[in-house]
Image: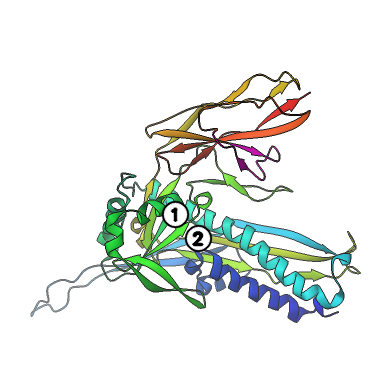
């Protein structure tokens, strides 16, 4: 059956790699030359070369000798992620399996793989900026000024002929769009990403790449086991903006050839089985460590989380509450969700204070809630998910 051929497996892998490059906000960092050096190993040694500057030429003694310093730095890939996907035999005919499998795998890369890789890359770069104190302070009402500060800091390190990129949180991007300065300065330019050329907005030649808030945090927990996926780490902060050279980081991504099994070969179920694995990490050369700068939201500290409640149908009373503090101005938004993992969140209209009164009309069952604590009307952090049991 053609679905199990090596050619098809390789074709799926190649197409998924192309989709990753096109859909990922950080896909242009991909370094295929560096990836080839990781074949069969987790670690590669990359030389960082340093030279001495010019000296005067002496007509008697001639040239002044200079040293070349080569520091070999070891880089180890940390992210080895995988998932096995199945499509039941009854969901398609043999003639339609290739088509449906391509759509499902493409959607999986678009909705699960790309967001996780973007989140990891941006959080690691933001963490580097914070560790080296490469941070600027900004005013959320004057985002253009903060962006200019970041660009100037990076250009002071790498010069003015390097192509720069600015990752901008979705909330901050909206604020930028509404600023009077940017309307006069912004232009549309070509931006090469993978095998395609995109049209992006830019300021003074710096490409502006908007990124959804969920991928712009300082730290994440990358879950293992059945749940999988990723969630912001406790007390993770919003990354408002991050600026670096376009070639300032190396995203090493090794996608294994797709393993495909027919229902006859799948011993676990009467289904087609697709094993997808991606092995990746992002590295910054020593010479570029101070060329990554960020504007990070103020810290939000939740000192008191909402707690589980048990109430009685027909006479429900009580509320859920959170206590949080920050140097920023805080607002709140409560959500309902499907389970204790916060799946399928739905915003509750009008629930915009630190406490939320449990609705009196709930029928017997279990309900889940959490609150997003928001700094300066931008991004924020989520509280614990709490369960309300109605007897």
Whichever of callouts 1 and 2 sits on the residue coming sooner in the sequence is 1
Q: Which residues are magenta?
A: 335-350
Q: Quadrant of residue 111?
A: bottom right
In the rendering, at what x and y percent does residue 99 appear? 75, 75
Is residue 343 rendered magenta in the image? yes
Q: Tell me, yes or no, if residue 354 can be seen here.
A: yes
**364 and 341: which is toward the camera:** 364
* Circle 2 residue: 282
Left or right: residue 151 compared with residue 266: left
In the rendering, at what x and y percent does residue 78 appear? 58, 56
Q: Quadrant of residue 315?
A: top right
**157 and 229: which is toward the camera:** 229
Which residue is at a point 88% across and 66% down the rendered structure image? 89
Disc 1: CA contacts within 10 A as few (<14), some (14-19) or many (>=20): many
Which residue is at a point 89% across and 60% down the rendered structure image? 269
**385 and 290: which is toward the camera:** 385
Say if 135 sits above or below 275 in the image: above
* Circle 1 residue: 125
Task: Characterize the magenta stretch by its predominant secondary structure.
Answer: loop
Label 1 SS? helix
Say if 89 sits above or below 94 in the image: above
């Amino acid at each position: 059956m053609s679905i199990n051929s090596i050619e098809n497996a390789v074709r799926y892998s190649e197409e998924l790699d192309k989709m990753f490059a096109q859909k990922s906000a950080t896909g242009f960092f991909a370094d295929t030359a560096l990836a080839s050096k990781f074949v069969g190993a987790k670690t590669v040694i990359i030389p960082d070369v340093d030279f001495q500057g010019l000296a005067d030429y002496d007509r008697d003694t001639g040239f002044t000798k200079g040293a070349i310093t080569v520091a070999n730095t070891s880089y180890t890939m940390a992210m080895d992620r995988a998932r096995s996907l199945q499509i039941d035999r009854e969901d398609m005919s043999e003639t339609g399996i290739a088509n449906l499998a391509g759509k499902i795998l493409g959607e999986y890369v678009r909705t699960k793989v790309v967001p996780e890789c973007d989140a990891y890359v941006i959080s690691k770069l933001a963490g580097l900026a914070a560790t080296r104190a490469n941070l600027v302070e900004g005013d959320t009402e004057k985002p253009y000024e903060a962006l200019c500060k970041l660009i100037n800091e990076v250009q002071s390190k790498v010069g003015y002929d390097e192509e720069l990129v600015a990752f901008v949180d979705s909330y901050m991007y909206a604020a930028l769009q509404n600023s009077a300065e940017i309307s006069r300065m912004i232009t549309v330019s070509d931006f090469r990403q993978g095998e395609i050329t995109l049209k992006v907005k830019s300021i003074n030649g710096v490409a502006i790449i908007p990124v959804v808030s969920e991928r712009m945090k300082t730290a994440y927990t990358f879950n293992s086991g059945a749940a999988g996926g990723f969630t912001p780490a406790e007390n993770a902060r919003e990354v408002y903006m991050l600026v670096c050279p376009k070639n300032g980081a190396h995203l090493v991504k090794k996608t294994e050839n797709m393993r495909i099994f027919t229902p006859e070969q799948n011993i676990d179920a009467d289904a087609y089985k697709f094993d997808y694995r991606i092995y990746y990490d992002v590295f910054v050369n020593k010479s570029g460590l101070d060329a990554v700068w960020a504007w990070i939201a103020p810290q939000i500290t939740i000192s008191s989380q909402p707690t589980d409640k048990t109430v009685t149908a027909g006479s429900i009373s009580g509320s859920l509450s959170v206590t949080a503090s920050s140097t920023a101005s805080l607002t709140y938004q409560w959500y309902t969700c499907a389970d204790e993992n916060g799946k399928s969140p739905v915003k509750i209209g009008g629930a915009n204070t630190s406490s939320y009164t449990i609705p009196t009309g709930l029928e017997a069952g279990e309900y889940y809630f959490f609150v997003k604590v928001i700094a300066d009307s931008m991004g924020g952090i989520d509280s614990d998910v709490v369960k309300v049991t109605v007897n």
